Amino acid sequence: MRIGELAERTGTSRRMLRYYEEQGLIASQRCANGYRDYDELCVDRVQQVRGLLDAGLPTQTIRRILPCLGPPGRIDIPNPTPETLALLERECERMTRRIDHLTRNRDAMRAYVARVRADTPPANEQGPGLRPGP
C-alpha cells in the first residue's frame, strides 16, 4: 500500500510515517517510480509504535523492542539480557513518574475549574455589561 493509504488507515500523518521509517520503526519497499510501498503488517506496527510513543517511550527504546513485539499489546522477549530488563524497568519507572505528574496536573486543573465555577455567578445574575449579547 502507498503511504497515503497507510496514513489514512492508521490516522498518522505521512510526515510521521516517513519519520518512523527514518528511525527504523517501520520499513517500506520502493516501487520502480520511487514511491514507498508498505506491507499490510505495517498497519499494526504503526499502531503499536504510536501506542508506545504515547506511553512515553523514546524511539530508540521502541527500536530495540520492535523485534519482540507480537500482537498489539504484547511484548515477547525470549531470554532477555540483563540490559534489556534494566531498560524496561527504567521505562516503567519513568512512565510511573509521568503518570504521577499528569495526575497532579489534572487534579490541580479540576480544582481550579471547580473554584472558578463556584465564584462565577450564573449568567442571569451578572451585572450590567457582563451579560452575553442578544
Image: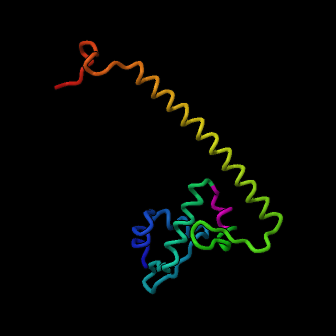
Where is residue 119 shown, x and y percent of the image? 41, 18
Q: Is residue 70 left or right of residue 87?
A: left
* Image position of 103 with respect to 79: above or below: above
* Image position of 117 with respect to 5: above or below: above
Q: Is residue 11 left or right of residue 103?
A: left
Residue 74, quarter of the rendered image: bottom right
* Image position of 96 with respect to 12: above or below: above
Q: How is the image coloured?
A: rainbow
Q: Is residue 51 left or right of residue 1?
A: right
Q: Does the segment drawn in magenta span residue 63? A: yes
Residue toward you, 101 or 12: 101
Where is residue 83 shown, x and y percent of the image? 81, 63
Q: Residue at x 67, y 47 (%)?
A: 96
Quarter of the N terminus within the rendering: bottom left
* Image position of 130 with respect to 110: above or below: above
Q: Residue at x 54, y 61 (%)?
A: 50
Q: Does the segment drawn in magenta span residue 91? A: no
Residue toward you, 31 or 66: 66
Where is residue 99 shown, x and y percent of the image? 62, 45
Quarter of the C terminus within the rendering: top left
The region drawn magenta spans 57-64
Q: Looking at this rendering, what residue extends furthest in the right direction? A: 82
Image mark count: 0
| Helix, strand or loop: magenta stretch | helix
